[in-house]
């Protein structure tokens, strides 16, 4: 017994619907990245892509593998806690290829960044009014940056 | 060579598996790093910060942050008798070149370095409509620049103002906690460049990390605790006037 007459168009509609659903899943499989949902509602591969960013600061451990003498001088003085690249800037390129000259930092700019007197700074930090203190002389005349105590002598 | 129907039916699933593994790509770059073994945070020791701006410059150099935008910046607070609830806060160019000299004055001064708080329940990741920003298995909040639409919902959602739309890439950008460094056993660029040790990267899942002893013995606070963001940047001796 047939419930409806002319049921052919219903099957055509159902077929069309099935094809539509199927193509939705096929297209979706192509458009959604493979790693999406690996760890959560995001592209898991993004994590390793972000981790692949190049390094610019080599890190003081890297510096100390070659510059052991400077590290020793520095660790004996008040600047023991200051990492190399805090003053020298990012030098990963120099660490990869030592023939790249890192250049010498300008003490006139560098020292006052931390040591210029200001009421806003914590009282424990040694602070000077650079104009009065040095009379225009460069800092390294009296202070060696790696061990700034006067007793340690100025830089050569 | 002719294929029988039986052979074809056996070969098809094999080909599908091969195609799948081809699409899956190469595994992650840092073989010695297991994400689930870490839960990253940062400790900021306010009495140690001298406002030199080294962290801001280091961050900019390490992460190619465009001028005028900041993944980390330093604010200087001045709280005097009359402005307890309304402190004077300055951050000239994010504190990148330091701060103007402050004259001896009434009240107190202090510096507050700021960065993404890498919240455990972060509002920014909840509003992303496409799953472009997320909290990684190691507790670092990251942005997938290939998936980001640049709608800036997250920029508005962050209660700490830590996100911006990159002017060239037109996608959301923020502190990654130097994810490319910490996954290789290095500290962040800002911690590396800080001359006073005011910033310390910390791994809360590492039982030997000095942060655990520090948190037990110091007055430590997070920013905007009332927002229940689960912020993971801890501030030692944070003043009540800091917003």
Image: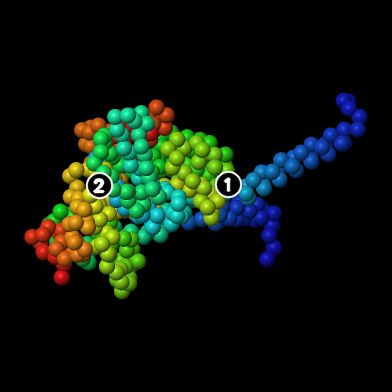
**Which percent across, then down, holds residue B132?**
53, 44
Residue drawn where x is 75% and y is 40% of the image? A18
Residues tagged by mark 2 and mark 1 found on one chain of the structure: no
User: As displayed, is residue A60 above or below residue A37?
Assistant: below
Q: On the rendered structure, is B122 left or right of A64?
A: right
Element at label 1: loop
Between A150 and B5, which is closer to the camera in this rendering?
A150
Query: Is residue A64 something that shows in the picture?
Result: yes
Task: Assign a secondary structure to mark 2.
Answer: loop
Q: Position of residue A73 (x, y in %)?
A: 14, 61
Q: Nearer the viewer, mark 2 or mark 1?
A: 2
Q: Quadrant of the N terminus of chain B?
A: bottom right
Q: CA distance from mark 2 to mark 1?
A: 44 Å
Q: Disc 2 designates what residue?
A: A118
Residue A145: image location, x then y, percent: 19, 61
Is B134 on the left-hand or right-hand side of A119? right
Q: Position of residue B167 (x, y in %)?
A: 52, 52
Asked where in the image residue A7 lies, by quadrant, the reply is top right
**Residue A34 against residue A99 in the figure, above or below:** above
Q: Residue at x 53, y 36 (%)?
A: B127
Q: Would you say A101 lies left or right of A136 here?
A: right
Which image quadrant: the C terminus of chain B? top left
Q: Residue at x 33, y 61 (%)?
A: A90
The answer to whether the residue labelled 2 contacts the one labelled 1, judged by CB atoms less than 8 Å apart, is: no
Number of other residues with Cα within 10 Å of mark 2, as a class: few under 14, some 14 to 19, many 20 or more: some
Left or right: where does residue B62 sit relative to residue A71?
A: right
- Protein chain holding label 1: B
Q: Chain of mark 2?
A: A
Which residue is at a point 46% across and 55% down the rendered structure image? B66
Crowd tier of the residue under label 1, counting other residues whose Cα lies within 10 Å: few below 14, some 14–19, many 20 or above: some
Q: Nearer the viewer, residue B180 or B25?
A: B180
Give residue B149's mark. Answer: 1
């Amino acid at each position: 017994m047939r419930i409806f007459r002319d049921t052919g168009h219903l099957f055509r509609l159902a077929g069309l619907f099935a094809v539509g659903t199927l193509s939705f899943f096929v297209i979706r499989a192509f458009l959604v990245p493979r790693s999406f949902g690996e760890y959560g509602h995001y592209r898991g591969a993004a994590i390793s892509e972000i981790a692949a960013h190049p390094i610019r600061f080599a890190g003081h451990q890297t510096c100390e593998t070659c510059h052991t003498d400077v590290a020793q001088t520095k660790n004996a003085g008040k600047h023991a806690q200051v990492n190399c690249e805090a003053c020298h800037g990012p030098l990963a390129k120099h660490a990869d290829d030592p023939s790249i000259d890192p250049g010498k930092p300008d003490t006139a700019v560098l020292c006052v960044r931390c040591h210029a007197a200001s009421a806003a700074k914590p009282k424990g930090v040694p602070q000077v009014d650079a104009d009065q203190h040095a009379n225009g002389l460069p800092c390294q005349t009296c202070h060696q940056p790696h061990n700034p105590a006067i007793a340690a002598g100025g830089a050569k | 060579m002719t294929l029988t129907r039986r052979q074809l039916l056996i070969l098809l699933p094999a080909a599908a598996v091969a195609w799948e593994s081809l699409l899956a790509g190469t595994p992650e770059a840092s073989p010695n790093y297991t994400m689930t073994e870490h839960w990253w945070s940062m400790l900021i020791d306010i009495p140690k910060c001298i406002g030199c701006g080294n962290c801001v410059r280091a961050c900019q150099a390490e992460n190619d942050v465009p001028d005028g935008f900041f993944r980390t910046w330093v604010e200087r607070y001045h709280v005097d008798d009359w402005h307890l609830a309304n402190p004077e806060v300055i951050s000239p160019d994010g504190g990148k070149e330091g701060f103007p000299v402050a004259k001896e004055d009434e009240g107190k001064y202090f510096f507050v370095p700021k960065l993404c708080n890498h919240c455990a329940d972060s509002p920014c990741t909840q509003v992303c409509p496409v799953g472009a920003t997320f909290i990684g298995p190691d507790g670092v909040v990251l942005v997938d620049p290939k998936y980001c639409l640049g709608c800036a919902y997250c920029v508005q959602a962050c209660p700490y103002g830590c996100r911006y739309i990159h002017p060239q890439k037109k996608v959301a950008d923020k502190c990654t906690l130097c994810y490319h460094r910490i996954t290789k056993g290095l500290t962040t660029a800002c911690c590396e460049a800080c001359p006073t040790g005011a910033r310390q990267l910390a791994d809360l899942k590492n039982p030997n990390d000095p942060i655990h002893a520090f948190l037990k013995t110091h007055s430590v606070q997070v920013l905007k605790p009332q927002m229940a963001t689960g912020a993971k940047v801890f501030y030692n001796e944070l003043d009540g006037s800091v917003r």
